[in-house]
Amino acid sequence: MTCMVTGWGDTRGTPNAIRTRLNQASVPISELTACNISYSGAITDNMICAGLPEGGRDSCSGDSGGPLICQLSDQKWYLVGIVSFGNDCALPNFPGVYTRISKYITWINVNMM
């Protein structure tokens, strides 16, 4: 499954710099059990983890609240997560953590319609 995260956050260790370009990164969905081990049991089924096992691509400071979108088998792109947190940025074995939209879709539909 192809997923992309976008944001205006930190890219080169300059968290307070003014961004003039929206950044994007292709990230694979990570296995939740392994992610939970990396984060010492803090990961729940209300979350999605995404990132490269070797690090190097991730959401970062300033990206919180941004979208994680994935292209599903019907070739359409769907919002599946919202940037939440991580251990620094793009570190090996510490994927980014996202709020799992599917766990909140009923609440969203009731309160936003």
Image: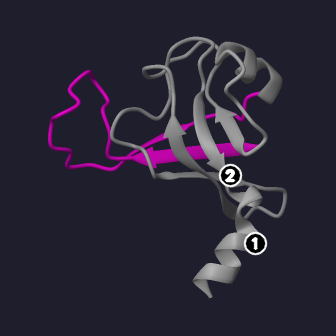
Judge left or right: residue 87 versus residue 61.
right
Q: Which residue is mark 2?
A: 70
Q: Nearer the viewer, residue 58 or 48?
A: 48
Magenta stretch: includes residue 3: yes
Label 2 residue SS:
strand
Q: Identify which residue is drawn at 61% across, 34% down.
A: 27
Q: Nearer the viewer, residue 23 or 95?
A: 95
Q: Quadrant of the N terminus?
A: top right
Q: How many marks?
A: 2
Above or below, comparing residue 8 to residue 97 in the picture: below
Which secondary structure class fits the magenta region best?
loop
Q: CA distance from mark 1 to mark 2?
A: 20 Å
On the image, the x and y values in percent for residue 38 come to 67, 14
Q: Identify which residue is drawn at 75% across, 72% down.
A: 106
Residue 80 found in image quarter: bottom right
Q: Magenta segment, which residues?
A: 1-30
Magenta stretch: includes residue 87: no
Q: Amino acid at mark 1?
A: Thr
On the image, the x and y values in percent for residue 101 come to 68, 57
Label 1 residue SS:
helix
- The first of marks 1 and 2 along the sequence is 2
Q: Amino acid at mark 2?
A: Cys
Judge left or right: residue 72 versus residue 2.
right
Q: Nearer the viewer, residue 84 or 13?
A: 84
Above or below, comparing residue 7 to residue 108 in the picture: above
Say the numbered circle drawn on residue 3.
Answer: none
On the image, the x and y values in percent for residue 24 come to 45, 43
Q: Which residue is mark 1?
A: 106
On the image, the x and y values in percent for residue 99 come to 62, 47
